[in-house]
Image (cartoon, helix red, strand yellow):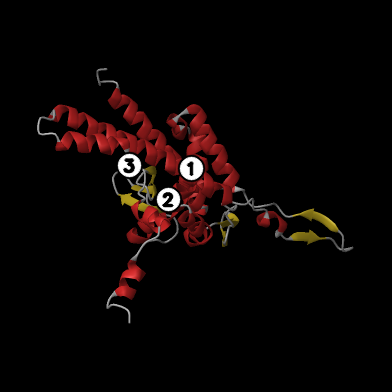
Amino acid sequence: MKAPGASIRKATQMNPITKHEANATLPADPIVSMIERVVMNPDADLDKLERMLVMKERVDAQSARIAFSHALASARKDMPTIVKDAVVDFTSSKGRTHYKHETLAGIAKQIDPILAANGLSYRFRTGQQNGVSVTCIIEHVHGHLEETTLSASPDQSGNKNGFQAIGSAVTYLQRYTLKAALGLSAEVDDDAQSAAPRDIGRQGSEVHERPQPVDMSRRADNMIAALKRNGVTEADSEKFKASFAEMRSSDSENAARVEAEIETLKAAANADLAGDGIPY
């Protein structure tokens, strides 16, 4: 008859491999090991300990930046071209306005799983100084984060009340800060041209096409390029003002793009002026 507890002792015995696995530990961080030795020494130099802690923070921050860069590069490799999933189509006294744009929900649906798989997330911070500002924060699980900020005036187009004007600007800036932070691009849209009606002559043949609506997206691109080339003073020219006024009345989407560029250039100019008085 087996002695009581014999089977228990046998079951709890470990072979050499099990013992090795139980004793195995992850490689120790050499900086942490040095800090531990200094802390355990009653005669330790506190200034030296403080310098070691600062060095540890710097090394950790650098490692987090590297991990962030690797994660973002891996995510970008799998990022799709963003699909424009919303249509704006209306006719006013100035003619027909027809274009597509991407929604924030549509962008999130395409990129959120890819970002999560790479340990990345994003969130937004808003403010209301000199208009509306939105900051998109991209963060990695190891702690490193990067921010992209854009500002614009509330969107006063249409019949929006004050709250709707702010909400419209915030939603717009959320989309564009997220796209800028991640380097996303949207598909090229030619629906405005391919869907344009044509006049048919008496014999049934095509005589001529109706004038196409003004391509506000291209106009906005040209205005932004002029601002970047000539500086914020470009916005004071009469030609620019007239074109921008027309855009604001018919296409708040692209008007907000141009206004965001103006505000960005103004902020940069103010920062340069403030920096002139700082001694180096």
Task: Determine contact: label 3, label 1, CB under 8 Å.
Answer: no
Amino acid type, label 2: Leu
* Comparing labels 2 and 1, the label whose residue is closer to the camera: 1
Q: Secondary structure at mark 3?
A: loop
Q: Residue farthest to the front?
A: 1
Q: Secondary structure at mark 1?
A: helix
Instruction: Tell me which residue sits at (31%, 43%) in the image.
Output: 130
The quadrant in which the C terminus is found is: top left
Indicate which disc residue 28 carries.
Answer: 3
Instruction: Tell me which residue sits at (47%, 31%) in the image.
Output: 234
Q: Mark 3: few, some, or many residues within 10 Å (few <14, many ≥20)?
A: few
Q: Residue tagged by mark 2?
A: 173
Amino acid type, label 3: Ala
Q: Residue tagged by mark 1?
A: 70
Q: Residue farthest to the right?
A: 203
Counting from the top left corner in percent of width and height, residue 79 is at 56, 51
Q: Secondary structure at mark 2?
A: helix
